[in-house]
Image: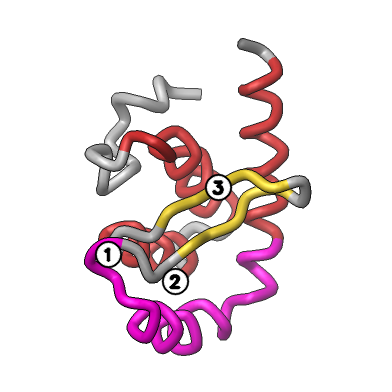
Amino acid sequence: MNDLLSDGLDPRPDLIEDHRLWVVLLQVAEELYPNTDVRPNLNGFRCMGARLNVTDKGLHMIGGLGEYSEEEYAADRREFLMPIEKELRAVFAEASKRAGERNASR
């Protein structure tokens, strides 16, 4: 695996709190579903300031923060994420696993 901090996957490295999680998520999206809308759609949400946090169930995306209002997030979620829900479940599950492994190895 490339150095996850320098490979440019996260379009918002300025949001440092969840930068590493986004790198893992976007990398998994590209690996599992190349040449589809999965990674570009997630990338768009990140560009708008969506955040990731870790819960007891794995990674969870949060919108409605910063420049991304709750209304915009909800509308974009319906339009861009719900049609690929099955793929996103697989991506989030694998990214959650990898993020957990990375934290355990520190």
Q: Could you say whether the residue bearing mark 1 is in a helix, strand or loop?
A: loop
Residue 64 or 47: which is nearer the viewer?
A: 64
Q: Amino acid at mark 1?
A: Met
Q: Amino acid at mark 2?
A: Asp
Numbered mark located on residue 37 in the image: 2
- Which is closer to the viewer, label 2 or label 3? 3
| Drawn side of residue 27 relative to residue 96, left or right | left
Segment colored magenta: 66-89
Residue occupying the point 61% across, 65% down? 88
Residue occupying the point 63% across, 50% down? 59
Query: Residue extending furthest right?
Result: 57
Q: Is residue 26 above or below residue 49?
A: above
Residue 5 or 87: which is nearer the viewer?
A: 5
Q: Amino acid at mark 3?
A: Asn
For mark 1, what is the residue?
Answer: 48
Q: Could you say whether the residue bearing mark 3 is in a helix, strand or loop?
A: strand
